Image: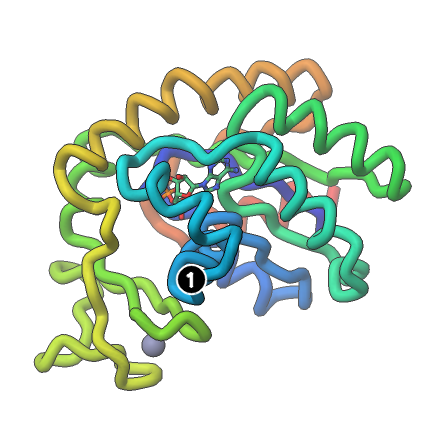
Amino acid sequence: MRVVLLGAPGAGKGTVAKQLTEYDGSIQISTGDILRNAVKAGNELGKKAQGFMERGELVTDDLIMDIMEARLKEPDCAKGFLLDGFPRTIPQAEALKKLLAKLNIKLDLVVNLDVPTDVILDRLTTRRTCSNSDCQEIYNIKSKPPKPDGTCAKCGSPAVQRADETEEAIKKRLSTYNEKTMPLIDFYQKEGLVKSIFSLSSEEIVNQVKAAVKK
Ligand code: ADP
Ligand code: ZN
């Protein structure tokens, strides 16, 4: 399937994407993960992105489009993809549209994960992420805790709070989402691609996406 996942930070895009990859072999492409790996590696891309990310701001559209153009040309995308965290602005959505036309690829669906703000805030402050860049398993200290010593149940690396999960950065990320990313729902609605899902259960969301893609 070729799907875009929209939703506020903490709406569950990453969790849903991971579950859908297991369903049909479509790959998850998370611009957030790509950028965090670059920051960790300390490479050129990471140096450009780090400041923006720590403040909870978006990195520039040009930088993101360079990453995504290269990524979508990789052969593994032929199996389908779940775009998690991209596009995030109208210029990115417009650039993606051109890019997909050039590559002769059509999107099946744009999923809008609709989650109330109080749930989002609670999730973001209680979220922990595996610090191993090859794993990045997501935990929640209330509903899905890491091991008692704070390490990842999958790989044993420490599960940590992300640098952009301070209260201030979280507020910034949410206001950026409302201002820059919400308008994409309208953009894709005009293309007849949007399915809004109002649910707090990732299993239920996954089932609804599967059903919608089959149609
Ligand atoms: P979340 O959705 O939980 O906020 P992500 O992991 O998707 O987090 O992104 C983390 C950070 O990476 C963002 O706050 C932003 O700085 C940067 N980023 C990720 N994707 C994009 C994008 N498509 N455009 C601009 N910045 C991005
Ligand atoms: Zn891990």
Q: In this view, does 55 lie above or below 38?
A: above
Observer-nearest of 122 and 166 = 166
Residue that label 1 marks:
42
Quarter of image, ligand 2: bottom left
The amino acid beneath tag 1 is Gly
Give the residue displayed 46% in from the left and 44% down from the top. Answer: 48
Does 159 sit left or right of 12 as displayed?
Answer: left
Tell me, yes or no, if residue 15 can be seen here.
no
Does 9 sit left or right of 113 as displayed?
Answer: left
x, y percentage for residue 179?
39, 16
Observer-nearest of 63 and 1 = 63
Q: State how the image is colored.
A: rainbow
Q: In which quarter of the image is residue 63?
A: top right
Which residue is the extreme one toward the bottom?
Answer: 156
Tell me, yes or no, if residue 209 can be seen here.
yes
x, y percentage for residue 120?
24, 37
x, y percentage for residue 183?
51, 16
Does 166 sit left or right of 48 as displayed?
Answer: left
Give the residue displayed 62% in from the left and 28% down from the top. Answer: 92
- Total count of labels: 1
- Is label 1 in a helix, a strand or a loop? loop
Q: Is residue 156 above or below residue 11?
A: below
x, y percentage for residue 29?
58, 54
Give the residue displayed 15% in from the left and 33% down from the top. Answer: 168
Would you call the spot at circle 1 few (<14 residues within 10 Å), some (14-19), or many (20 or more)? few
Task: Indicate if the residue with disc 1 has its beta carbon within 8 Å of ligand 1.
Answer: no
Give the residue displayed 74% in from the left and 41% down from the top. Answer: 215
